[in-house]
Amino acid sequence: MSFFDKFPSMSRDELLDFKKNVDSGFSEFTGEYGEAIEAFFDPLLWFLVWFEKLLLSTPWPIILFIVGALAWAGSRSIKIVIGAILAFVAIGYFGMWVDTISTLAIVSVATLICIAIGIPMGILMARSKYAQALVTPLLDIMQTIPAFVYLIPVVMLLGIGKVPGLIAVCIYALPPIVRLTNLGIRLVSKEALEAADAFGASYRQRLFGVQIPLALPNIFAGINQTIMMALSMVVITSMIGVAGLGVPVLRSISNQYLALGLLNGLAIVALAIIFDRVTQEYGKRLQKHRYGDHS
């Protein structure tokens, strides 16, 4: 057999030794630092549990009112408000209220975390070419690597529960807000920046008074995509003990319950449509304001 017939590779024993060394090294790291890492995430777990209990203990009419108010604040469309309220009424009528609220809790907290991390990271990338060169490959990896791959080390470190699921959601949903914040700030016209400089604006004043306001349509487009990607992780996170609409979907797959899977799948779709329409309409309003169209 010639050199070109078989691709050169490690021997079976060498490959086994390499895998064993990686596994044993990570096991030692988990045993030594696992408790400290869990303690670091305890405040996040407390906040997630508190927020979920708060939503579950809130009477359903108040939840419907809040949903309608947020839909109106974002979209200014009575059709979207009515559609959002009717979707939640249908969800409750078909017995999916508790699972939906649990899903809302983890998606909301994950979105807040992604916004808190993603917008500053996008600003840093827009400010520094070196930061962009460093962060962009990481974002590529986060978007392309299968969720099951990074679930393995997260579960080994933190076990089964809400926090590993939340971390998995954040890893998957973070890249859009980072990329679009970076893009939005880079697209701010040079004329606007030169005008700010001409008035003697400092870097902070130029950032918060000119760049971020003009980049808001792109930033909200990133938030929209982050929410959509967080919702798409609902079923996967149910595999590691995260309560929500993904649990009955997973159960329906295991037991071939068509109606159960269909109803809960449609509930996820309804949430995605509501979030998508509201954030898109808000982004369009910002876009009109940006270009002076007040019609």
Image: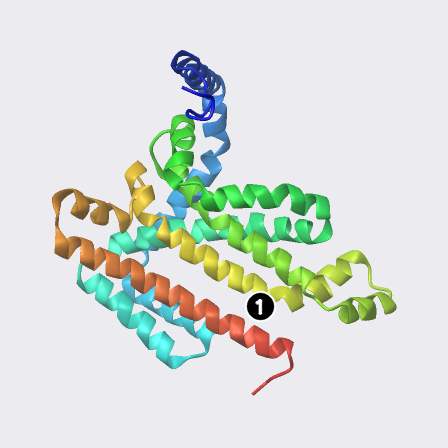
Q: Is residue 172 above or below residue 10?
A: below
Q: Is residue 70 visible?
A: no
Q: Residues within 10 Å of mark 1 (few under 14, many from 20)?
A: many
* Residue drawn at the location 50% of the way across and 59% of the way down: 223
- Is residue 108 among the parts visible in the rendering? yes
- Position of the C terminus by quadrant: bottom right
Is 138 placed above or below 177 here? above
Query: Outermost residue, bottom direction?
Result: 295
Identify which residue is drawn at 45% across, 14% down.
21
Compared across the picture, whether 194 is left or right of 108 comes to right
Q: Amino acid at mark 1?
A: Pro
With respect to residue 61, does 127 lie above or below?
Answer: above
**Chosen colour scheme:** rainbow
Estimate the x, y position of residue 75 in percent, counting from the top left. 45, 75
Q: Quadrant of residue 204?
A: bottom right
Residue closest to the eye, 137 or 53? 137
**Image x and y of residue 270, in percent:** 30, 64
Outermost residue, front direction? 2
Residue 183 in percent (x, y) is at: 63, 59
Q: Position of residue 110 (x, y in %)?
A: 45, 49
Give the residue number, with chain letter if any, for mark 1.
217
Q: Nearer the viewer, residue 80 or 10?
A: 10
Q: Is residue 127 left or right of residue 97?
A: right
* Residue ID at (54%, 45%): 139
